[in-house]
Every structure is written in C-alpha cells, then in structure tokens.
Image (cartoon, helix red, strand yellow):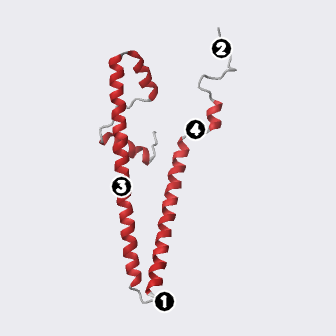
C-alpha cells in the first residue's frame, strides 16, 4: 500500500489541475536530451511548462495566505470589539489591549506550530548526511566484483 502525505497529494492535485508537465525526473530528462535536437527542444518546452506550473502554484499559495491573513485580522477585530462591550471592572481600553495581545499571541503560536509541523514532515522524507555517505552513488568501492 502506498502512503502519501497530504501535502504531496495536494501538490499533485494542483499540478494536474493546472495542466502540469510530463512527470519525468531529472535523470530521465538528461538522458533524453542527449538523443537529438528535436528531443532537446521538447524537453526545454517541458521545463518551461514546469516553471509555469510552479509560478502558478506559488501564486495560488500566496493568494490563500493573504485570504487567511485577512480572516485572522477580521476575527481579531470582531473579538476585540466584543471584548470591549463587556462590563468588566477595569477600563475598556485595558480590555481591548489585553484581548488584542492575547489573540495576536495565540495566532503567532499557532503559526509557529504549523511551521514546525511542516518542517518536521519535510525532514522525514529527506535523507540525512550520514545515510547518504553510507551509500555512495558509484556503489561501494570496497565491494569485490567477479571477473
């Protein structure tokens, strides 16, 4: 059974939604580029399409981030206004400032937690330096081969 993370699924969905380029990795592209000029021209077009898809993806993610920021700011304004209407023993200004600081602090903590969570998820999939040095790309130099 193949298990993929949510971010990988979303990235694939956005790529197919935006008409992504062929799913070739870099080694396959280099091997095909050596064959002939027409193949090279086609591969350049594929790379340009990949760049366009990445640009569209960054634009969409940026727009979603701006929308999320507007929602958070709107929610903070509503909470501060609601807190200002409460009948508390201290002044309305103290209530508004305290509510704003607490809401901003909670938003910052959640953003930090989400950032750490994404970094941990990304670090799980990347090889460490120790594991990369254990398996050199050319194979084990000490390995005996039969003639």
Considering the numbered disc 2 on the image, is that residue within a helix, a strand or a loop? Answer: loop
Counting from the top left corner in percent of width and height, residue 74 is at: 36, 69
| Residue at the disc numbered 1 | 90
The number of callouts visible is 4
The residue at the point 35 percent across, 55 percent down is 64
Measuring 34% from the left and 20% from the top, which residue is drawn there?
A: 39
Identify the residue position indicated by label 2 in the image.
145
State how far apart marks 2 and 3 are (Cα). Answer: 55 Å
CB within 8 Å, label 2 to label 3: no
Q: Are marks 3 and 4 in contact (CB under 8 Å)?
A: no
Q: Residues within 10 Å of mark 3 (few under 14, many from 20)?
A: few
* Marks 1/2: CA–CA distance: 83 Å
Badge 2 crowding class, 10 Å Cα cut-off, few under 14, some 14 to 19, many 20 or more, is few
Mark 1 and mark 2 residues within 8 Å of each other at the beta carbon = no
Q: Tell me if label 4 and label 2 are in contact, CB under 8 Å.
A: no
Vertical arrangement, residue 132 with respect to residue 96, above or below: above
- From the viewer's perspective, is residue 27 above or below residue 95? above
In the rendered image of this protein, does residue 137 appear above or below residue 61?
above
Q: First in sequence: mark 2 or mark 3?
A: 3
Instruction: State the image quarter where residue 96 is shown.
Output: bottom left
Q: Which residue is mark 3?
A: 64
Earlier-in-chain disc, 3 versus 4: 3
The answer to which of marks 4 and 1 sits earlier in the sequence is 1
Label 1 vs label 2, nearer the camera: 1
Secondary-structure class at tag 3: helix
Report the residue marked by disc 4.
Answer: 127
Split into 4 quadrants, where in the image is the C terminus? top right
Q: Nearer the viewer, mark 2 or mark 3?
A: 3
């Amino acid at each position: 059974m193949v298990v993929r993370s949510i971010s990988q699924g979303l990235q694939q969905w956005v790529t197919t939604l935006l008409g992504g380029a062929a799913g070739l990795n870099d080694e396959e592209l280099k091997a095909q580029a050596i064959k002939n000029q027409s193949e090279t021209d086609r591969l350049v077009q594929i790379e340009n399409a990949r760049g366009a898809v990445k640009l569209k993806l960054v634009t969409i993610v940026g727009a979603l981030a701006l929308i999320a920021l507007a929602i958070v700011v709107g929610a903070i304004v509503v909470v501060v206004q609601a807190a200002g209407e409460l009948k508390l023993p201290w002044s309305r200004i103290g209530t508004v400032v305290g509510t704003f600081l607490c809401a901003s602090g909670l938003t910052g903590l959640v953003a930090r937690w989400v950032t750490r969570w994404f970094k941990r998820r990304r670090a799980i999939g990347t090889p460490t330096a120790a594991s990369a040095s254990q398996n050199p790309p050319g194979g084990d130099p000490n390995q005996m081969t039969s003639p």
